[in-house]
């Protein structure tokens, strides 16, 4: 007997939601990390978490924790290195030239969409892009030229982050293993301008191939079941489209028949930052607990009355500078100094910082001095650069393909002519970052390290030359501080 289990979402989607949520918070910054409370910072007690004292302890524990926003700074740095604003679109078909200024029909430029895609891939590992033909006439509908213009019939590229893609499947069709099913969800707040109330609206988009290998799409909401939603078939030059007009962008090569499980290249940096955040909470609580504690002994039943008389009516023991306490006979005061060291914490923070920087994390400079080693300054993290090069290639290839899908919807090429026409689309992303060229600030940091004795002259010259400086430039840079 076969047992069938109904699963609404892909299991990989379900398994990764917690990790993705944590990573997104780490990128957004300290406020968003702390807002997740216990999810990212467990209660320090394994016994009492609910009493009034335990709740107050956690409040102070959370307030004391420090989150270093290295993940967000690193993401901005990597995106800046790729210089998307210098993307070259000089070779672009006139029929779809509108995509350059408005790629998604919502006002996002093609450059902006490429950068948004890169940002998501760096964070969560992959991103889905879909080519659509908006407001197209249905079968049997004839439109005049003016009616077609008024309807704004055009192709567009829609973007779906990893959290939006809730299910997928691959099948071997006509001997080719290909994506055969994709389900996306979109949740948004809709405002009723009359009442001022907001309502959460959830909509689904399904893209699939039927038993004959023909592509169709469905849109429905929570009030409509998927099996009741209309199947909208797409034809190209009168023939059914035989594949999903989808591109999946990743920072690594995607294995056929699988969606990548791992998160993006920023993930280990975000994880290390969250680990540091949790240890910082323990560190701050330990500092608070090792403050010297004063105590008194030897009190009698009449001792407190005597204390008040001896201290001009004062009914408390004073502490701090210039404090004087006259004590009754037999009463003594002493201070307890806990014998706890913070050295273990300090070693951890240093090791954690080194790990983050080894992953390519961008740590703020301290007093204008570089926190990079000579090797890190020279290589700009060779692993990060190699991943950026792969991402750069994948972005170019995927966006060329998507633009060809749009050109196909406009009737300029057939669905079986995509591979032969990839050269029609000129999308050339800058690749200067692959040459590890040092910025002027980084050149200054190398010079400062040379002047402070961290680098020898030969080492500083080698780093600057490999960072794109000419020999004469090197002499000038080093001489600026020697005079």
Image (cartoon, rainbow, N blue to C red):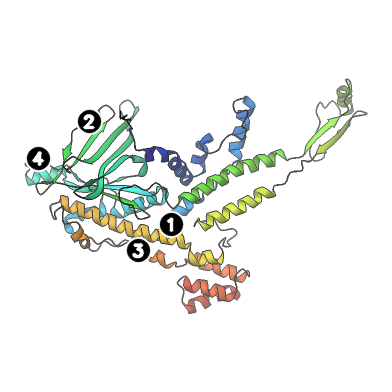
Percent from the top left, x then y, of residue 298? 88, 28
* Residue that label 3 marks: 430
Q: Is residue 68 above or below residue 309?
A: below
The answer to whether one can see residue 429 in this image is: yes
Picture residue at 56% right of the left edge, 62% below the top = 370
Between marks 2 and 4 in the image, the one whose residue lies nearer the viewer:
2
The Cα–Cα distance between marks 3 and 4, rounded to whole angstroms, is 43 Å
Q: Nearer the viewer, residue 302 or 458?
A: 458
**Cα separation between marks 2 and 4:** 22 Å
319 displayed left or right of 397: right
Q: Nearer the viewer, mark 2 or mark 3?
A: 2
Q: Secondary structure at mark 4?
A: loop
Q: Earlier in the sequence, mark 2 or mark 1?
A: 1
Q: Which residue is mark 4?
A: 139
Q: Which residue is mark 1?
A: 78
Instruction: Give the position of the N terminus as an image quadrant.
Output: top left
Q: Nearer the viewer, residue 304 or 54?
A: 54
Query: Which mark lies nearer to you, 2 or 1?
Result: 2
Q: Could you give the CA–CA distance between mark 2 and mark 3, rounded to whole angstroms?
A: 46 Å
Q: Is residue 52 left or right of residue 198?
A: right
Please tell me which residue is depicted at 86% across the width and 29% down the height of the picture: 297
Crowd rating for badge 1 (residues with CA inside 10 Å; few <14, some 14–19, many 20+): many
Label 2 vs label 1: CA separation?
A: 44 Å
Q: Position of residue 377 (x, y in %)?
A: 52, 65
Q: SS for tag 3?
A: loop
Camera-nearest label, 3 or 4: 4
Circle 4 crowding by C-alpha within 10 Å: few under 14, some 14–19, many from 20: few
The spot of residue 178 in percent (x, y) is 25, 48
The residue wearing badge 2 is 227
Q: Which residue occupies 16% across, 55% down?
A: 95
Disc with the residue nearer the chain's start (3 vs 4):
4
Disc nearer the start of the sequence (4/1) = 1
């Amino acid at each position: 007997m076969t047992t069938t289990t109904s699963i609404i979402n892909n299991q990989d989607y379900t398994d990764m939601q917690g990790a993705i949520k944590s990573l997104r918070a780490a990128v957004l910054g300290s406020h968003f990390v702390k807002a997740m409370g216990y999810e990212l910072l467990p209660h320090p007690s394994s016994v009492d978490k609910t009493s009034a004292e335990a709740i107050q302890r956690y409040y102070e524990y959370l307030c004391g924790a420090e989150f270093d926003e290295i993940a967000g700074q690193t993401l901005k740095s990597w995106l800046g290195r790729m210089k998307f604003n210098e993307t070259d679109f000089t070779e672009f078909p006139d029929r779809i030239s509108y995509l350059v200024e408005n790629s998604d029909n919502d006002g996002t430029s093609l450059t902006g969409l490429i950068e948004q895609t890169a940002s998501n891939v760096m964070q969560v590992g992959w991103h889905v892009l879909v080519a659509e033909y908006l407001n197209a006439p249905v079968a049997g509908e004839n439109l005049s030229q003016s009616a077609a213009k008024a309807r704004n019939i055009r192709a567009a590229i829609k973007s779906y982050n990893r959290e939006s893609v809730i299910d997928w499947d691959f099948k071997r069709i006509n001997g080719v293993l290909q994506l055969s099913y994709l389900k996306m969800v979109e949740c948004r707040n809709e405002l009723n301008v009359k009442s001022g109330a907001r309502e959460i609206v959830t909509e689904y988009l399904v893209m699939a191939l039927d038993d004959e290998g023909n592509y169709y799409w469905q849109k429905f909401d929570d009030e409509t079941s998927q099996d009741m939603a209309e199947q909208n078939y797409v034809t190209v030059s009168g023939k059914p489209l035989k594949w999903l007009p989808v591109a999946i962008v990743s920072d690594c090569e995607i294995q056929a028949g699988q969606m990548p499980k791992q998160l993006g290249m920023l993930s280990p940096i975000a994880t290390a930052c969250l680990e540091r955040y949790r240890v910082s909470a323990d560190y701050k609580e330990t500092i608070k607990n090792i403050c010297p504690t004063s105590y008194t002994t030897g009190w009698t039943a009449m001792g407190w009355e005597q204390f008040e008389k001896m201290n001009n009516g004062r009914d408390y023991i004073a502490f701090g500078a210039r404090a004087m306490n006259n004590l009754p006979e037999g009463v003594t005061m002493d201070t307890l100094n806990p014998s706890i060291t913070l050295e273990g914490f300090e070693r951890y923070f240093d090791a954690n910082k080194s790990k983050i920087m080894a992953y390519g994390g961008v740590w703020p400079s301290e007093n204008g001095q570089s926190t990079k080693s000579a090797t890190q300054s020279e290589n700009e993290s060779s692993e990060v650069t190699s991943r950026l090069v792969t991402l750069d290639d994948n972005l170019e290839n995927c966006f060329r393909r998507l633009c060809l899908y749009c050109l196909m919807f406009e009737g300029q090429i057939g669905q079986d002519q995509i591979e032969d026409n990839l050269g029609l689309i000129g999308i050339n992303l800058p690749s200067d970052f692959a040459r590890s060229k040092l910025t002027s600030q980084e050149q200054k940091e190398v010079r400062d390290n040379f002047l402070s004795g961290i680098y020898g002259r030969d080492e500083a010259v080698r780093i600057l030359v490999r960072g794109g400086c000419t020999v004469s430039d090197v002499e000038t840079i080093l001489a600026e501080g020697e005079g």
